[in-house]
Amino acid sequence: MKIASIVGARPQFIKAAPVSREIRKHHEEVLVHTGQHYDENMSGVFFEVLDIPPPDYNLGVGSGSHAWQTGEMMKGLEGVFEKEKPDFVLVYGDTNSTLAGALVAAKMPIPVGHVESGLRAYNRIYPEELNRIVTDELSTVLFCPTQTAVDNLRKEGITRGVHMVGDVMYDVALASGEAARSRDIVKRLGLKKGEYLLVTLHRPSNVDVRETLEGIVQALLRTGQTVVFPVHPRTRKSLEGFGLWAVVQAKMRVIEPADYLDFIALLTGAKKVVTDSGGVQKEAYFFGVPCITLRDDTEWVETLEGGWNSLVGTAPQSILNGIAAPNPTRTKSAAFGDGHAAEKIARILDKFA
């Protein structure tokens, strides 16, 4: 069976890595990068470190409005599908690449599988939420990372083709933890484990509005703690545009976006992580690092159990209160599976051959 896997950003390559290894044992895979996000850190080393196959196609779509970007992806994917004639299309997560892949496949029609199906923040202001909902409606097979995701789909009347397989990011975390421990980035930056905050910030609602971004920056500066800040290109552009870049550079440990293993090394060495990323919320939970999330809701509700993740919004005092709160003491749950999600996905796909 020929399977076309659609990815558009570095996190999706990481999610696809263990699945690709498994499905290539029995099937032919065509890996398509839409080029939704250009990431200069996605070098040959990136693919080598995580044993990720390089893409067979790069559509090079780049950034743009949601409608333009999705439309350009759909045109490019239609051409790839017409040429390759895949028997099955696999999409990941909740980006515009996810939606474009599902729409084109469903219209051709080709069966669609959605990895990370059933996630809901129940807030349609997020483009990602709309992408999830539409992709799930179009999917033939829905691979859910948690029981909550299965329950969410059931509430929407979707029960056919639903499989609770666990989280592929947990697969990656388990496999990469040992390699990350050998990285010396904490030492190279002159840091001490457990004595710094790690910050990631990239959501448009947080970085595109001056008042919001300024409030977040001021809260981080008021902690009096060492702040390690791998700055996303979008965030840097806003910091520069709002006149905040100089103070951030002067008062925080600003670094370029780290590769996956260096980032996990920084995460596991941090006192706490402050983020607006869904993926980082999970990674913090996997490795037992308290997480302060700069959002009012999350699609990963399991991370809230036991106080491991706190939703604090973007008000400066709420951020400070979250950072100052005592560390959780309760044991984390096994909500994200057993580390074999990729194998389960591949075996389910075998049945379509």
Image (cartoon, rainbow, N blue to C red):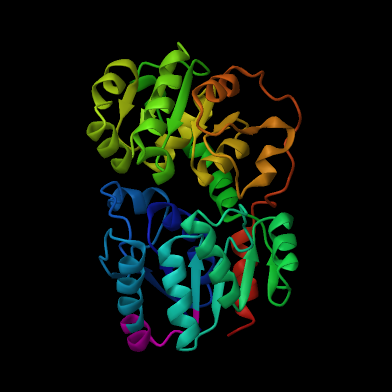
Q: Which residues are magenta?
A: 79-88
Q: Main secondary structure of the magenta part?
A: helix
Q: Nearer the viewer, residue 57 or 178?
A: 57
Q: Quadrant of residue 310?
A: top right
Please give the name of the residue rendered at 44% of the width and 14% of the height, measured from the top-left corner: 222
Query: On screen, 71 above or below 82?
Result: above
Q: Please provide percent x and percent y for residue 52.
A: 41, 58
Q: Quadrant of the C terminus?
A: bottom right
On the rendered structure, is 56 left or right of 153? left
Please give the name of the residue rendered at 59% of the width and 17% of the height, measured from the top-left corner: 324
Q: Please provide percent x and percent y for residue 132.
A: 55, 63
- Pick out the residue farthest to the front: 211
- Mark yes or no: residue 24 visible: no
Q: Please provide percent x and percent y for residue 273.
A: 52, 29
Query: On screen, 140 above or below 291?
Result: below
Query: On screen, 58 above or below 182?
Result: below
On the rendered structure, is 174 left or right of 8? right
Please give the name of the residue rendered at 30% of the width and 72% of the height, measured from the top-left corner: 72
Q: Nearer the viewer, residue 186 or 12?
A: 12
Q: Nearer the viewer, residue 49 or 294?
A: 294
Q: Quadrant of residue 54?
A: bottom left
Q: Is residue 85 magenta?
A: yes
Please give the name of the residue rendered at 72% of the width and 55% of the height, measured from the top-left corner: 148
On the rendered structure, is 152 left or right of 267? right
On the rendered structure, is 160 left or right of 196? right
- Mark yes or no: residue 51 visible: yes
**Count of number-bearing discs:** 0
Q: Is residue 224 magenta?
A: no
Query: On screen, 298 above or below 249?
Result: below
